[in-house]
Image (cartoon, rainbow, N blue to C red):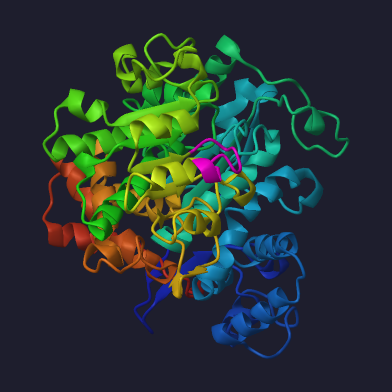
Amino acid sequence: MIEFELRSDAQGGGFTLPTPLHGPTLLQSPLFNKGSAFSEEEREAFGLTGLLPSHISRMDEQIERTYDDFQQKPTDMERHIFLRALQDRNETLYYRLLGEHIAEMMPLVYTPVVGAACQSFSHIFRRPRGLFISYPHRDRIEQILDNRPVRQVDVIVVTDGERILGLGDQGVGGMGIPVGKLSLYSLCGGIHPARTLPILLDTGTDNAQRLDDPLYLGWKHPRVRGQEYDDFVEIFVRAVQSRLPNALLQWEDFSRDNAARLLSKYRDRLCTFNDDIQGTAGVTTGTLLAAMKQSGRRLADQRIVILGAGSAACGIAGLLHAAMLMEGLSPAEAGGRFWLLNSRGLLVEGTADLQEFQCGFVQPAAAIAGWTTRGFEYLNLEEVVRNVRPTVLIGTSGQGGAFTESVVRQMASTVERPIIFPLSNPTSKSEATPADLLAWTEGRAIVATGSPFDPVEINGRHIPIPQCNNSYVFPGVGLGILASGARRVTDGMFMAASRALAETAPAWTNPEGALLPPLTQIRDVSRQIAVAVGEAAQRDGVADRVTRDILESRVAANMWEPIYPRLLPA
């Protein structure tokens, strides 16, 4: 375990970084390595003379060389592998390259390509990153945490790999998600990569393809469930409280049965949140608030149908419900605005096997009186759309193509500007393509998606498709938590993040503008969200009071720029 401490450089500006590493070991450490950019003095001081070509490169030369190499890769998977290898070789160069080509490269380091990378994890594995905590090692978790590469950790992203995007159980391959998420914390929110730690809780897998694969790198055992699983997670949480008590812990891609339950269990014990629930809710609410500006409507007046009734869907509905209360609706009035469907149909009073987190979004039987003679359990999406006449349709189902032409045309026949958000990812799981949605609505639909899509040309218009991606929210939330010193994460902090995001959208001031700002502005977006989150943390009593000026300065101080520091012997 090493110390990593950037210090202001009194001699020439910028920063200095003490390091005990030397020679080939230094060149193999991505947090300290500069490759061909080591200065003459650094080469002499750290025993690098002769280990590198004689030319001392500038950062822009390295970026040009690396980007040329990147462009030679023929497939998205090979580009993903190339970028991951760069991250494992030289983190500063990696983030500088991503920052200069963010729109092109974000889909490669996260959705949608990260999904395929998780599926192929054991076949493309090059170099370990983060911590793998296997169930057989459950009595040694504190010791495993002590094996982390860097002492100070500000942000942990943890998964058990059971529900990776819309791809299901990937076992140990799920590690690609924490690695990718933390890359976005650094890229979009400026949190230094040395302060982040990805963790995979390996409790086995029920994916027969993985278990039958001789190259599978995880624990080859059916998933541990029930009390044994809960005890394992409890041991992990206690180890984090013991070893990293001030770290923010983000839960990622846990199953429907575990995600909301674990969040509820631990949110008052840790500074923690679940991005699939709260981050998805935050970005969806922010994007929908911008859509309200674009369409000239009030959120409180919307009728919202959500296909998919898992923890993500209920998280979205919960935050939108809170936003409607802020616009003056009563809880009962706001509750009547939401219609959620799971794989068996509409959630109605009497629906069997409801999860606790779904109970707040169950419609009374009287609400569907006269809809059908077959029984509510047979109510499908098309029937719900026909009867509810929704103004907003959101997809979190993971069912590619679920928003059919007949469903969309039915919706568009009753509302001038239908708002349709197919949010499932990766791309193959999207409920519809933007091109189809716009064609079926004669270009009237307001569309945002969970995965990246190309712009659509229709009726002489060029329509960019905003990606309603959590990366617009969680990096700023994390940055605001660190800057404010928040001890817990509240729903009010995510509401503040949603409103701050909406206010950065071009549509907020221009009805013809986009629902989300361009990715090239995402660090500024994260900064504004961070300040809003920090202020909300103070209002909610989970952070000490400071002035806005002090909070803004703390946010700025926590935002790292990928520039090489001057290395000093430790």
Q: Is residue 459 above or below residue 88?
A: below
Q: Is residue 314 magenta?
A: no
User: Where residue 131 sits in the image (x, y, percent)?
Assistant: 61, 40
- Judge whether 93 appears above or below 544 on screen: below
Q: Quadrant of residue 296?
A: bottom left
- On the rendered structure, is 336 left or right of 519? left
Q: Is residue 568 left or right of residue 412?
A: right
Foreground pick, 6 / 363: 363
Can the viewer see residue 309 in this picture? no
In the rendered image, the residue lying farthest to the right is 214
462 on left or right of 163: left
Q: Nearer the viewer, residue 51 or 86?
A: 86
Residue 264: give x, y in percent of width and height.
37, 23
Name the residue: 51% across, 38% down: 252
Chief secondary structure of the magenta portion = loop
Determine whether, in the image, residue 407 is placed left or right of residue 356. Answer: right
Q: Is residue 398 magenta?
A: yes
Q: Quadrant of residue 355?
A: top left
Residue at coordinates 76% horizontally, 22% vertically from top-left? 221
What residue is drawn where x is 61% and y is 20%? 139
Using the rendered view, name the quadrant where residue 21 is placed: bottom right
Residue displayed at 50% across by 26% down = 380
Q: Nearer the viewer, residue 541 or 324?
A: 324
Q: How many marks?
A: 0
Look at the image and give the residue range highlighted in magenta: 396-406
* Residue 86 screen position, x and y as percent: 66, 66
Q: Is residue 110 above or below residue 37?
A: above
Inspect this view and state whether residue 422 appears.
Answer: yes
The x, y position of residue 175, in whole percent, is 63, 42
- Going by the picture, which residue comes out furthest to the bottom? 55
